[in-house]
Image (cartoon, helix red, strand yellow):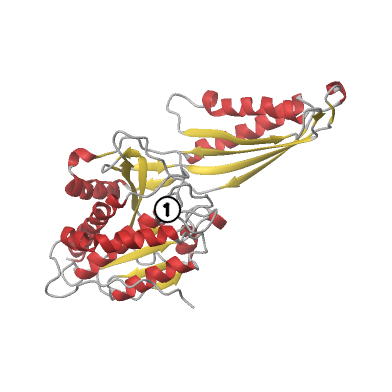
């Protein structure tokens, strides 16, 4: 049985505000309350049943006919079957396996699960977009806007975007747009750029097998701890010394587990880490060098090394035309001086890449860093999405939708004339 959603009423009559800004400001208290409710009840990837129920009921109130996708995701068309171009707007819904350490009145009720990346805010933004578009359904240019509420962005079983693409969520779609709040950028500013804006990711696990023994007799052991220490240093030099001044890749060793006590040389050690690259060929070069370094250091220390590489999300490419669309929409809403490409690309990865590699698209960042303080970043235990971003971000998405329906429709008319 689908969870019962909180009821939100929307005025869709002659008294309804005329402008998108008025519509969203009128809804803002309800949207903030919804965001707090989602924050209080976080769900991990592919487990977002309650969130799915709330989103579905919310959309049904607005006249949409939402359908499930990728298990716990939701897809909804503003005007299904209407002739004209179609674009898609995406929001992610899942939380992280992190314990909340804030004293917020709406803090997570689930130990070890919390919205520490802001997806509760992203979902709320897109529901605000859904409301604004529904209120203007009859006055928009011809065409359709498809809303994608995606599960499992945080990498569970390869991510929800890939599954949504496989299940046809982008069929008939010309362009796709998505965003992320980002506390590392100043609050109220937008960052967008053409080309790669987020990196491809690969993970690695190195298991070192040696021959342990008494700490007083290292000469009769094959010490994986010493080998691992040398390996960490050598691996950290791959990107630093293997790439020119343009950079474009990061290799990080993030875990080294070896030994349990002071007087025993262990027989086994495990290293974990990631490789991120903004160019596919460069990423392959780094991985090839990784394999060489692991083999060489292991041989030098007479231990066996077993390297396992996992492939994560691919590079997220922003189509130049779509990036310009975002730039113009954000500049209109926020002011041109608050929109730039500063700080991009990022070495983080995102499964919106599957959408953006399937059709032209753009992914942008909305700054959340509060002036004069060190705002907790995404994935920090003290992070909380800033409610003040809901309305301006939703306005940007609505402006993108209106502009693209109008422009794509005009382009199609010229092609058929």
> Can you say whether 279 is above or below 169 in the image?
above
Residue 258: percent from left, percent from top: 72, 34
Q: Which residue is drawn at 23% across and 66% down?
A: 133
> Can you say whether 27 is above or below 215 in the image?
below
Q: Is residue 148 left or right of residue 166?
A: left
Which residue is more in the foreground, 390 or 106? 106
Which residue is more in the foreground, 104 or 183? 104
Which residue is more in the foreground, 108 or 13? 108
Which residue is more in the foreground, 280 or 236? 236
Q: In this view, does 336 lie to the left or right of 267?
A: left
> Can you say whether 86 is above or below 191 in the image?
below
Q: Mark 1 packing: few (<14 Cα in 10 Å), some, or many (20+)?
A: many
Quarter-of-image position of residue 297:
top right
For label 1, the residue is 352
Q: How many marks?
A: 1
Label 1: which secondary element = helix
Q: In this view, does 27 lie to the left or right of 114?
A: left
Which residue lies most toward the bottom here? 1
Q: In this view, does 163 lie to the left or right of 22?
A: right
Q: Residue at x 46, y 43 (%)?
A: 380
Q: Which residue is drawn at 70% across and 29% down?
A: 228
Quarter-of-image position of residue 355:
bottom left
Quarter in which the C terminus is drawn: bottom left
Quarter-of-image position of residue 342:
top left
Question: Is residue 135 in view?
Answer: yes
Residue 70: percent from left, percent from top: 49, 66
> Can you say whether 138 is above or below 93 in the image?
below
Q: Which residue is drawn at 44% across and 54% down?
A: 107
Residue 334: percent from left, percent from top: 20, 46
Question: Is residue 411 in view?
Answer: no
Residue 289: percent from left, percent from top: 61, 31
């Amino acid at each position: 049985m689908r969870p019962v959603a909180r009821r939100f009423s929307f005025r869709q009559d002659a008294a309804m505000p005329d402008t998108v800004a008025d519509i969203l400001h009128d809804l803002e208290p309800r949207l903030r309350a919804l965001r707090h409710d989602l924050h209080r009840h976080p769900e991990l990837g592919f487990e977002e049943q309650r969130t799915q129920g709330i989103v579905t009921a919310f959309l049904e109130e607005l006249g949409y006919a939402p359908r499930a996708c990728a298990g716990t995701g939701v897809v909804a068309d503003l005007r299904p079957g209407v002739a004209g171009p179609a674009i898609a707007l995406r929001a992610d819904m899942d939380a992280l396996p992190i314990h909340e350490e804030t004293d917020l009145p709406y803090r997570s009720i689930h130990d070890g699960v919390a919205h520490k990346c802001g997806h509760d805010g992203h979902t709320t933004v897109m529901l605000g977009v859904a409301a604004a578009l529904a209120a203007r359904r009859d006055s928009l240019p011809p065409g359709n806007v498809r809303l994608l509420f995606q599960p499992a962005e945080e990498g569970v079983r390869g991510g929800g975007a890939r599954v949504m693409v496989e299940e046809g969520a982008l069929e008939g779609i010309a362009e796709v747009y998505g965003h992320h709040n980002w506390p590392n950028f100043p609050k109220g500013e937008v960052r967008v750029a053409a080309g790669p804006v987020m990196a491809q990711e690969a993970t690695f696990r190195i298991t070192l097998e040696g021959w342990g023994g008494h700490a007083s007799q290292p000469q009769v052991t094959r010490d994986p701890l010493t080998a691992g220490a040398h390996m960490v240093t050598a691996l950290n030099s791959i990107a630093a010394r293997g790439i020119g001044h343009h950079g474009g890749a990061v290799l990080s060793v993030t875990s080294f587990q070896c030994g349990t006590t002071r007087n025993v040389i262990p027989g086994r050690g495990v290293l974990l880490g990631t490789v991120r690259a903004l160019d596919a060929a460069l990423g392959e070069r780094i991985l090839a060098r990784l394999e060489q370094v692991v083999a060489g250091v292991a041989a030098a220390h007479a231990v066996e090394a077993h390297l396992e590489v996992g492939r994560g999300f691919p590079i997220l490419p922003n189509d130049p035309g779509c990036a310009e669309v975002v730039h113009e929409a954000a500049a209109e809403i926020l002011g041109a001086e608050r929109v730039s490409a500063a700080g991009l690309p990022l070495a983080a990865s995102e499964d919106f890449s599957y959408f953006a590699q399937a059709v032209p698209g753009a992914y942008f960042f909305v700054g959340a860093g509060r002036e004069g303080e060190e705002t907790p970043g995404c994935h920090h235990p003290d992070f909380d999405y800033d409610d003040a971003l809901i309305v301006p971000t939703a306005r940007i998405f609505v402006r993108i939708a209106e502009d693209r329906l109008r422009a794509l429709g005009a382009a199609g008319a010229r092609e058929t004339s």
